Every structure is written in structure tokens, then in C-alpha cells.
Image: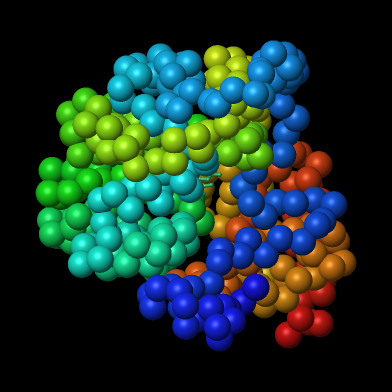
Amino acid sequence: MAELSRRMRALVQPHLASIEPYDPAFAPCRINLSANENTYPVPEPVRAAIDAALAATPLNRYPDPMANALRDELAVWHGLARENVCVGNGGDELLFNFLFAFTGRGRTLVTCPPDFSEYAFFASLVEAGAVAVPRDPETFAVDGDALVAAAATADAVIITSPNNPTGNLVPLPLIERVCSACPGLVMVDEAYGEFAPAGSSAVPLIARHDNLLVLRTLSKAFGAAGIRLGYVLAAPDVIDVLAAVRQIYSVNVLTQAAATAAVRLRGAYRPVVDQIVAERARMTERMAALAPAGVTVWPSAANFLLVRVPAAAEVRRRLRDEYDILVRDFSATPGLAGCLRLTVGTPEENDALAAALTRLVTTEAKELS
Ligand SMILES: *Cc1c(COP(=O)(O)O)cnc(C)c1O
């Protein structure tokens, strides 16, 4: 679906008339490294615990609206209290609810593009004014002084760390400066936080900054994108707002049961995350070795790499059609000309992708131009 019918354009709220739904450009492929999912098998003890929890869950009763058992588990993990946690149907629901509650018509949201495209989309749904503080076009570093200046008059700020799709972190001292400068709310989106070096999370700053929210999800490191579970950590009165605006039963009983089991056994994911981090380093080297063929790779603290390749859209198409490998094309996104995003998969998946990419940008380079 590209655009609304004429009839619907006339009937929806005027600001929704030109809206286009998020398109992940999915195509079924043998190797899918396009959506930053965890492609490793769920650790066996976790899978067993999830299966047992699902089997023991009655389906006839409404869910616990706030998912308190899960909140408690998340709170223990992060050294906080239940009152500091709100769960949602994926991080996306919480992002929308955050913007719905704290921005809206006549208010402003500050972001640092290129970043997660959902921010701008959700902001448009709630008619928030989007203020962009662009990243450095070469390094993708955030312009700290410009961000702090913009935050000083903002109703809300979203900082993505590690950033999707550029992979880099925002330093904690800058996050603190933004929290101090902003009269509104500051959300740090840590969807990829588990893949970042220890000490890069903003969660410990919540104790000092009551306008800070940290967004996390089970969709990436936990390999549970299908169950739709995200959560926000923040001061209790911020959580009260998110609790008040949310759809009360948005996190269903099966998701609550599976997520609680997975979070309880979170230690079992450590080897998986460590392996993805090691594979990230290996893939970064392999991409860096393609520099003579015109390939650029940026350092990443997440489970994906941003690369710039010659004829990116064509390379992405040929990876899909000739090699059955799906990656994400960002080459049409402002600031990301020539860029593809490669999820770090299993060693076998990564080898297949690296070999195919190498062939496409070296031996077959002539055909492409
Ligand atoms: C994946 C992602 C999320 C949330 O994803 P959900 O599956 O909705 O939990 C949030 N922010 C960023 C930057 C992401 O990449």
C-alpha cells in the first residue's frame, strides 16, 4: 500500500492524508540479515522454560494490565523498582505512546538523523514538530553543542545509542548535558544496548535525572522480535504517564509468560551476545578489507554494520535475487547515500554474505557500472 485512496484522503484527519506506512521492504530469503533480529537459536534452557511457561498459561483470562511479574524481573535486572518500569507491545508502542503523551501539535521533538525512521513517522502521526540535529556526515557523531541547544527548548528528545542504522554510541556525559538542558523529557533508545560495551548504558543516570527515559526491547539481543515486548525505565511519575495512556491489555498473556521466562534466564544469552560481538569484529575486518573496491564500513556497537558500497541499491537487489540474501538498503535515506545495513548473523550467514558482497563489489564490479 503506497498511498490512501482518494476517498480516504478526504475522510481521514488532514495531517494523515499523505501518510505512508512503515515499509521494512521484506522479501522471503534463505538468509535474512535485514531487520537486526538475533538469528541464533534461542539457548536450550530458555526455550524449555518459555515452552513450559506458555503451556501453563490460561488463555481465558485477561492479562495483568501492567505485567507486574515481568516488571519485577526487569526491575531486579536493572537495579530499579517495579515503579520504574512500563512494558509495551514492542518498543514501537512505547515510542508512540511517549510522543503521544509528551509531544503533539505545537510541540517539538528533537532527534539526530539519520536515525530510526519510526521517530519521524510517529511524530507526524501526533503532529509534533520535528527538529533535526543532523549527525556529522562522515563519522555520524552527534553534534553535542547543537543537540544541547536544541534540547533547551524541546518538549522531547530522542537519542539512539547505539544508533540505528549508524551503529555508534552517544557518550554518557552528553546525555547528561541534554537531560540538564531539556525542560521536557529525554528518551535514550537502547534497543541494541546489550551489544554495546559495558558501561555505555544510560540506565544508571535515571537516578540523577528524573526527565530521562531509557527504552529497551527483547526484539534484538533476546531473539524475541516475534513476541513484541519492549519496556521503558524511568522515574515513577514518568512511568505513571505511560501507564495512563497505554492500551491496557497491549501485552498479552503469552508474551508476558515468555518474556518473564526469558528475562529470568537472561544470563543464558551472554554467550550468544558475545559471539555476535565477535562476529561483528570479524565482519568489520572483512568489510574494511574491501576498501580498495570502494567499500566503507563504520565501527558499530550494535548487532549490525553500516557499509557504503558502489551501486548500493543494485548490490542489495543482486544479493537478494542471485544469492538469496536480504540486507537493508538505506541508499535513498538523506545522509546515507550508498549505504546498506548488514545484520550480524551466525558465522555461516556472515561468511555467505561476505563472500557474495566481495564478489559483487570486486570481480563483478565492471558489470555493475
Ligand atoms: C528495533 C528497534 C526498536 C524497537 O523494536 P521493537 O521490536 O518494537 O521492540 C526501537 N528502536 C530502535 C532504534 C530499533 O532498532
Closest to the observer, 363 or 315: 315
Say whether residue 64 is left or right of residue 243. Answer: right
Kindly identify the residue that appears in the image at 20 percent across and 55 percent down: 155
Residue 79: image location, x then y, percent: 35, 16
The quadrant in which residue 368 appears is bottom right
Residue 241: image location, x then y, percent: 27, 38
Q: Is residue 237 above or below residue 348?
A: above
Say whether residue 346 is left or right of residue 209. Answer: right
Kindly identify the residue that appears in the image at 47 percent across and 62 percent down: 117
Q: Is residue 181 above or below residue 89?
A: below
The quadrant the C terminus occupies is bottom right
Does residue 291 appear in this view? no
Q: Is residue 78 above or below residue 115?
A: above
Residue 344: image location, x then y, percent: 66, 45
Does residue 239 appear in this view? yes
Q: Is residue 304 above or below residue 297?
A: above
Kindly identify the residue that appears in the image at 66 percent across and 39 percent down: 226
Closest to the observer, 14 or 213: 14
Closest to the observer, 311 or 44: 44
Residue 324: image location, x then y, percent: 84, 59
The quadrant the N terminus occupies is bottom right
What colouring does the structure picture have?
Answer: rainbow
The quadrant in which residue 211 appears is top left
Kindly identify the residue that appears in the image at 18 percent across and 33 percent down: 210
Say whether residue 138 is left or right of residue 363. Answer: left
User: Among all residues in the image, which is located at the extreme right?
Assistant: 322
